[in-house]
Structures are given as C-alpha cells and as structure tokens.
Amino acid sequence: MPYTAELKGLIKKVEATRPARIEKKKRGEEFRLLTLKEREERLRKYHPDFVEGARKEIRVGPSKGYAISPEIVALLEAKSRVNPDSIDLTKIAYETDILILGGGGAGTAAALTAQEKGAKVLIATKLRHGDANTMMAEGGIQAATRATKDSPYYHYLDVLGGGHFKNTPELVYTLVTEAPKIISWLESLGCMLTKFPDGVMKALHGGGTSRKRMHYAADITGAEIMRTLRDEARNRAADIKVLEFSPAVELILNEHGHCAGAVLYNLETEEYFVVKAKAVVMATGGSGRLHIQSFMTTNHYGATGDGLVMGYRAGVKVCFLHTVQYHPTGAVFPEQAEGLLITEKVRGAGANVLNIDGEQFVNEREPRDVESASFIRECREIGKGIPTGSGKIGIWLDSPMIEILMGEGAVKREFPGKFILFKRYGIDISKEPMLVYPTLHYQNGGLEYNSRCETSIPGFFSAGEVSGGVHGENRLMGNSLLDVCVFGRIGGISAASYIKEKFKDGKLTLDHVRRYHKELEEAGIITDRVAPMLLPDYSNPKVRERQLTSHYIGTLR
Ligand code: MEZ
C-alpha cells in the first residue's frame, strides 16, 4: 500500500529540510555523537532491556540465578518434548562422525572444515538448508582488509566499544584477526561481494565503526554468503549429508558425560529418531521468533532458541542473554512488511533519521542499542514519532538522500532487495523515505564457549548466534556474518580434531533430561510447557481454544 495522503503531507517536511542536511553531509558535518555517559543514560531510560519486568531469574540449571528475558526463561524452565523413558537409544537411525545441528551459515561453514579434516558430516536442520538468520542478514560483513586505513586492532576496539567493554576478549581477538582471511576464503568459494570496476572491494561504515570495513553484496549479503556455503556443501555430498525438516529436540550424552548425538524430530512424519555421533556442533542460531516484549522481528521462521534449551539442559551455562538486540530500522509501514529488516547499510550510506518535523534527533550511526533507544525516546517520550494511521508509530529513514549523495540509480543499485519490495507496495524508496521502528534482531548472548568453540561438555561445540560472549552486550552490524564464518569454521576444525584425539565411545543416555526434570520438580516448577519450541505459534487465542489441546505445548504436539 502506498503512503496515505496524511503521510505524503508529512513527507513534505522531510523534503523541506533535506537540501540543508545534504549540504552538511557534503561538508562532512555530522549530528553530534553521544558521549559514553550519555549513551549509558539513554539506554537505561529507554532501551527495552531496562524496562520493568525485562529480566527474570532462571530457577534451575547451570546458570541458576542469572536474570534474562522471561520469554527465554520460560523455555529453559520447560520440560523436554520427549519422555526419556520412551526413547530407545539402541535404535540408531543414523550414525556419523560429526552431527551439526543447524543448516545456516555457522553450521554449513563447520561442515566444510570438518569435511576437509576427513570427517563424515551430517547436518540436521529444522527447515530447508539455508533457512536461517544468515540468509536474512543484508548489509554486510566486517573485516579490516584495507591495510593502509584499518587493521584488526581498530576492529577489536570497535567490537569492544559496541559490546560495552564486556565482551570475552579471546573471542573478540579471534573474530577480528580471522576476519580478513574469511573474506579471501569466501571469495575463493565464489562469493560475489560488491566491488569497484578496478576490482577493489567496496566498504562502508556501520553503526559504531571507526573505519569503513563493511563489505557487502548489495543488500543481500547474507543470502550471497549462504548461497556460496550451501553450494559448496552440496558439492561435497559424498561426505556432507543434509537432513532437512529434522530439528533436534534433545542432545544425547554417553556414559562418560561426552556428547554423543541427538534426538531429532521428523516434521513431516512427526517421528522422533536417534542420531549417534562422535561429536556434535550446535549451530541452531537465534531466537527472534520468541517476540520478546511483543516486538516484531527480522528473524527467520525457525528462530526459536532451540539450541539454548538443549545445551542448557545438558549442562552448558548461558551468558550475555541479559541483553537483547533490537535493530533500529525495522519496517513499520506498510503493515505487510512490519518488522522486516531495513539494512543498517542505508544509514551507512548516508541516510539521516528524522522525526515528524523532518528534524534530526540522533546521529544515524550510533551503535544499534543506542540508536534504538533514541527512536523509542523520540516516539514515546518526546512525542515526535510519525503515526502510520494504523495505530503504529515510526521514524523517517531518509533513503532519497542516498540518491543525491551517491548519484542517480544508487538506491536501486545498492539496495535492490528493498527497492523492489517497496516498489510492489507502491513506494519508491529512491524518492520517498521509509518509516521504521526498532525490531527484535539478535540474540546477543547464548551458550558459553571458548575460541576453539568448545563448551563445558566434551564432544559438544557451539558456533554462531546460539553462543555468547564475542559481542558482549551489543553486537555491531556485520559482525554476525563474520561470526558465523569464523566460529563455524573453527567449530568444524575443533570437532574433527576432537574425534581423532579425544573421542571415547560409550553407552548412550538421556539421564541429563531425567535429572533436569527432577530439578524442575524440586524447584516447585509445575509446568505442561515443553521446549524446544521448534516453530512459533501465531494462531489466534480463539482458534487455540478450539484446538482441543488442554494446555499450551507449542505449535507441534
Ligand atoms: O549484521 C547485521 O545484523 C546486519 C548485516 C544487518 C543489517 O542491518 O543489514
């Protein structure tokens, strides 16, 4: 749906202030960045992480007492989907060297390196191979490739600054020092990142970056990286098998306490089955579909935090889940596109963010948490948000500035995905600004792991968004695509060396699930809820009442 007459009227105010803002940009003048102290104040007052009720203590398990989002606590305090007594662990449906849970960027990168080290790999994924948040990432991948202007040193400082200096230093070190090699690796596999005619890779700023190091493939960087990794894995089909529509629901340990496989669920036949493996890599991604605090999300349909539940139940601590990332620019108009990612690259390319009067109120390149908190303040406290006409409120993202700053055709060339999408709704984003509001984007924390992707359980490795520590309390743009490649690759290498050097076969067991159920009972947690959730439930409460299910157990019974 095109903009209404009211919104078109308000766009005139944006157009009125645009020439002066363009002139300022050309002179290199920026809206003042907040000081560190001001940033902290803004977060504490307006960021959703700090609203009352945003955090709740987990009452059981290895991180008992740690306060995180209630929506995640509810999953961690749920029972297993399976009764451990009814699973016959001697009936093994598949046996492999390395089982990888999740077919996104991290899982697929892990499969490639594990295979190169001689392992036979099975990727089990909930939906199709590549249905993952990697596919949804748009604007870029960070790497300090421009030796004369940048270095991993500056990248390291930016990551720490973005993460409020809370990040795990060894993880950040690995992330930034591996980054330039990742770009070469992706290119060697055929990944097409955007370049100048002379072959030099283009680079832009992202929020919180001190150097231009955001490499990209138009506004479909994640899709291009996922395409490359998936093609490569499919080309090695003799050693890398893929099971689609088969999410994991429980890890299996062995009598030595090592990870030894997983119970999977066939979404089509609704059967559970056992996979035995010498090592397991958890790469199930994030949890945007939990819609924390009822926020819309940029995440793919299967992002329900399953890996957190399985890893935690097996005994791995969780960390950095006390902060959640809201991407400042989720679409808020038209309604069909609500929550959808409008890449940060739009701001990196120069588009200002504006209130109802067409005025700037924050620099467009503050770190994401500060930018989001500033949007919320402008809309909810200052009262200068733009009403969409359907009960929502947003901020203008002045995309036509890019057309003026970078030349005619720049919006279509640099942002083809969004240009085409909005065109279908009758909005030309090279001429009209977009309306945006924060949307749930990233699980900053997750399972505790180290720079070799090892967790506290031998034979169990973690990589990508399901893990916590590298991004501290807030991830910067372009570091998630980097994260999945860096730690996915390391996860595969570590799992392959583990099976050669440390693997110990033993009787399979689900005793950890029995123990967890007992702990729930002892904590007085009486619940019918089961987890992992697997898929979000969007049925309306009236329909749910007629679904003949006496209690909520998620979409699938
Ligand atoms: O790293 C991200 O989250 C990313 C690239 C998102 C975006 O704004 O495009």
Image: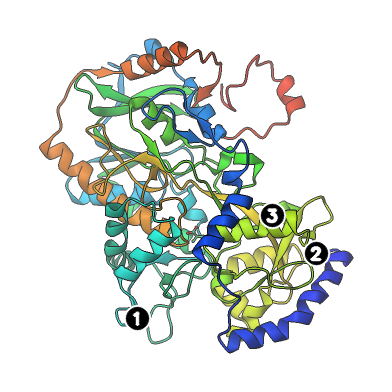
Q: Residues within 10 Å of mark 1 (few under 14, many from 20)?
A: few
Image quarter of the N terminus: bottom right
The quadrant holding residue 379 is bottom right
The residue that disc 1 covers is: 149
Say which label, 2 or 1, has the lower sequence index. Answer: 2
Whether residue 113 is situated above or below residue 34 in the rendered picture: above
Q: Is residue 525 left or right of residue 401?
A: left
The residue that disc 2 covers is: 2
The quadrant holding residue 215 is bottom left
Amino acid on which disc 2 is placed: Pro
Amino acid on which disc 3 is placed: Ala
Q: Give the SS element for disc 1.
A: loop
Whether residue 171 is situated above or below residue 366 in the rendered picture: above
Question: Farthest residue in the left direction?
Answer: 501
Pointers 2 and 1 in contact (C-beta within 8 Å):
no
Question: Farthest residue in the right direction?
Answer: 5
The residue that disc 3 covers is: 337
Q: CA distance from mark 2 to mark 3?
A: 12 Å
Which of these two is toward me, 13 or 504?
13
Q: Position of residue 173 (x, y in %)?
A: 28, 59
The quadrant holding residue 341 is bottom right
Q: Cβ of disc 1 within 8 Å of ligand 1?
A: no
Q: Cβ of disc 3 within 8 Å of ligand 1?
A: no
Q: Is residue 89 left or right of residue 323?
A: left
Amino acid on which disc 1 is placed: Lys
Can residue 525 be seen at all in this image of the molecule?
Answer: yes
Q: CA distance from mark 1 to mark 3?
A: 38 Å
Image quarter of the C terminus: top right
Q: Position of residue 5 (x, y in %)?
A: 88, 66
Say which label, 1 or 3, has the lower sequence index. Answer: 1
Q: Residues within 10 Å of mark 2 (few under 14, many from 20)?
A: some
